[in-house]
Image (spheres, rainbow, N blue to C red):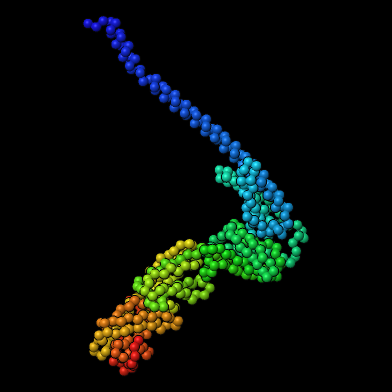
Amino acid sequence: MTSPGAHSGTSLRDRCAGEAGWALIETMVSAVLLIAITIAVAASLDTASRATAENKGRSVAATLAEQDQERMRAMNVTQLSNYHPAAQTLATPDGTAYSVASRSDWIRDSTNAPESCSSNNTQPDYLRITSTVTSRVVGTDIQPVIQRSVVAPPVGSLGPNQGTFSAKLLDGASNPVANFGVTAASSANSYSDITNSLGCAVFGYIPSGKTYTATASQSGYVDPDGNATATASAVVNAGKVTNVQLSYDRAGSIAATLTGPAPSSSGIMIAQSKWSSTAPRAWPVPAGQTSVTATGLFPFSASNYSVYAGSCAAADPSLNGGTAPTALVTPNGTTPVTVKLPPVTVTVKKGSSTPASADIKLTASGSGCTDTAAVTTTTGSATIKLPYGTYDICADDNSGRRVGSNGSNTVTNKDAGAAVTVDLNSSWWSSGSC
């Protein structure tokens, strides 16, 4: 029988044992609450600090923008025209660096928009000056500070014998190219400008009666003809806007792979209907090689290049029952294309017998063509892959009997290839070798 006292002691011990972990749990909960409160306070302090930095940065940037606006308004209008200097960096006493970019654009009063290079009736009415200020905070954590105002040319400040010259810069897709450097030069004057949001470089109120040439030049860019610089010229008329257009974009490439080794003095031909001269252009391929990359090609967005093997226009597959492959060039891209070389099979006979060995030479006969192939066969027959076109055939039996083309031994290589037999017993054989 258990005594009441013993029973009570056991119950007390049981209750104490059941509550033994509560102190540790309460301590952990308190620590977690303390950490959460600390993080919240730190976050609020960080937010307040960031807001203070942003407000300070915006205030300083606004002051710098206003100072830049005042500086530009004090400039002579002829100096302000085409004014797009490199951004200047200014440091505040606390060491924070601010970048101040200045820009002026000629504006038409009727549209309140930058000069679009599309009208030549009247010159722009006034200049819009823009100051953009950024720093490690302004323009990153918050929007950049931008201030704009207008400057109207004072009456009589611009002479009567002046006009405006504008150049519109377009890429391969005929889209305007903004913020691109363009120069305009005559025999006596030279100016530089940066294209506005409409792709126009505007040279306002410059001496008229002269021919000005607009030029865009940048490494890796080409004009439609593949030239490294794009140019356009026109005479500037007094009181008018003279517009020219430049097409300029990042160059692309075509990587051509031939279906067989290139013959001697051969290569690939590339044609483009939008070149100023539509004649195809040649890219040489070393004899025996099977690939070449043609570089410096303008990326026409809606006009493919035609590519075929050979050294002349006469090798065009479309002239010989075939179709030339095409390639769409992209800016700064490389477009692969496979170029076919159909097979030509030449069999050499000597009457009813086949010579034990024979030398065979094929020479393209088209105007300007230089494709040639020479082989020696011990079976009297050889198959050679050649560009499309017509070839003169020469064969000899290594014993002094030779047959040249003489206007008769020719073969035209077509889409499915070609085959021809040459007879060394022909009545017009001659001595010698090919």
Residue 398 occupies quadrant: bottom left
Q: Is residue 274 left or right of residue 84?
A: left
Examine the rendering and report whether any part of residue 190 can be seen: yes
- Is residue 203 toward the left or the right of residue 321 in the image? right
Point out the residue furthest to the right here: 156
Camera-nearest residue between 255 and 374:
374
Q: Residue 419: x and y, percent?
A: 31, 81
Q: Residue at left 36%, top 80%? A: 373
Q: Nearer the viewer, residue 109 or 194?
A: 194
Q: Is residue 128 above or below residue 289?
A: above
Count of marks overlaid on the render = 0
Quarter occupied by residue 308: bottom left
Instruction: Establish if 106 lies above or below 69.
Output: below
Which residue sits at x=62%, y=66%?
Answer: 214
Answer yes or no: is residue 58 visible: no
* x and y, in percent, of residue 25 in the image: 39, 23
The quarter of the rendered structure image containing the N terminus is: top left
The answer to whether residue 324 is above or below residue 377 is above
On the image, the x and y values in percent for residue 165 come to 66, 65
- Name the residue: 66% across, 55% down: 104
Q: Quadrant of residue 190?
A: bottom right
Residue lying at 36% horizontally and 88% vertically, measured from the top left? 405
Where residue 362 sits: x, y (%)? Answer: 36, 82
33 w.r.t. 199: above or below: above
